Amino acid sequence: MKGIELSRAYFEEYGRPMLENEFPDIMPYLAAGLFGSGSECFGFDDEVSTDHDFEPGFCIFLPDEDIVDRRAAFLLERAYAKLPKEFKGYRRAMLSPVGGARKGVIRTSEFFAEKVGSADGILTAEQWLTVPEQALAETTNGEIYFDNYKEVTRIRKTLGAYPEDIRRKKLAGNLLLMAQSGQYNYKRCLDHGEEAAAQLAVFEFVNSAIASIFLLNNNYKPYYKWSFRALRALPKLSLEAEIMEYLLTTGNDGETAEEKYYAIEGIAADVIDELAEQELTDAICGDLEKHAYSVNDKINDAEIRNMHILAAV
C-alpha cells in the first residue's frame, strides 16, 4: 500500500471521526491531509521506503493562535497521540507529533515559514529566486483531505508554480549551464585527456537539463534522488530520462564518447524545439547559449532581466 493511501484510509477511519466528534467547535478552522517531506508525499514510496518514517498518520493544519488558541491545539495534539498505534500492519512511531514532525498537529503559518520562509506563501522576487526548488515541491505535493478554513489551499495555490519571469530566469541559467557543460566542455575535456572532468561535465549537463525540463513543464523539481522518477512522469520531454541515464552510467572512451556527444546534442535539440513551441526564445540555431540569452531577454521585469544570467541557478 502506498503511504498516501495508508494515510487517507487511517484518516477516514480514525481521524475524521475524532475531529468531528471531539472538536466540532474548531472544525470550521481546520484542514487535514498529507504533504511535505517524504517519498510518500510524492507517490514515490515502495517497499524500500518502509524501512524508515513510514507509518499511518496525517497532518492536521490549524491557523494562528488568534483563531485557534493554544489550549485547543494542545487538546488536538493529545487526541492525535491517542489514535490507534497500529493500522493495516503498520505501527506509528512513538514520537510526539509536536515540534518538527512530518505528521500530527501543525500550525499552517509555521509549516510554510519553515519550508519557504513565508508564513502566508507570498514571496518576493528574491525569495522566488533563492528558495530551494525541492522546498517548493514539498509545499504543493501530496493531498488535502479537507480544508474548511481554506487557508492551506490558498497558500498552496499561491506557491503552485513559478511566476513567469522567475521561470524564465531560472530556465535561462540552466540553459547556459547545459551549453557550457554539454555542448562545449564535454568534448574539450576529452580532447585534454581529462576523462574524469568530462564525466563531471556530463553530470552538470544532465542536472541542468533535468532542471530545464521541469521548468518547461512548469513543475517543481523534487529532491535529487527522486528527480528521475518525477521526470519520467512529466508530460513533456519525459523520454529524455532514458538518454540521460545512459549518459550518466557509461564511460567516455572512444566510440562511447562520440555517441554520448551526439546524445547531448539530441537532448539540446529537443529542448530547443520545446523552447520554440512555448515561444520562449527568438534564437534560430542549435546553440543553447544563444537560446539562454534570448530567454533572458524576454523577461518583462527589468530588474530580474538585468541580474546575472546565472543568478537563479
Image (tube, helix red, strand yellow):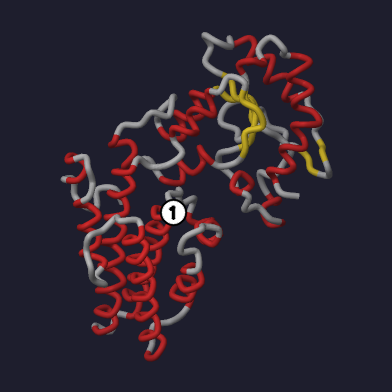
The answer to which image quadrant residue 286 occupies is: bottom left
The answer to which image quadrant residue 101 occupies is: top right
Decide: few, some or many residues near mark 1? Use Cα within 10 Å; few <14, some 14-19, many ≥20: some
Instruction: Give the residue at x 40% y 84%.
Output: 259
> Quick check: 273 left or right of 154?
left
Point out residue 30 in the picture as x, y percentages from the top left corner.
62, 20
Amino acid type, callout 1:
Asn
Instruction: Give the residue at x 50% y 37%.
Output: 139
As displayed, is residue 49 above or below residue 55? Answer: below
Q: Toward the viewer: 270 or 205?
A: 270
Q: Does dot 1 land on a helix, a strand or a loop? A: loop
Tell me if residue 204 can be seen.
no
Point out residue 211 in the picture as x, y percentages from the top left corner.
39, 56
As displayed, is residue 221 above or below residue 181? Answer: above
Q: Toward the viewer: 178 or 47?
A: 178
Tell me if residue 91 can be seen.
yes
Residue underneath mark 1: 217
As displayed, is residue 19 above or below residue 44? Answer: above
> Quick check: 194 left or right of 307?
right
Point out residue 175 in the picture as x, y percentages from the top left corner.
29, 61
> Quick check: 246 left or right of 216?
right
Looking at the image, the residue that sits furthest to the bottom is 254
Instruction: Give the residue at x 25% y 55%.
Output: 295
Q: Toward the viewer: 218 or 253?
A: 218
Label total for image: 1
> Quick check: 7 left or right of 163?
right
Point out residue 58 in the picture as x, y percentages from the top left corner.
68, 33
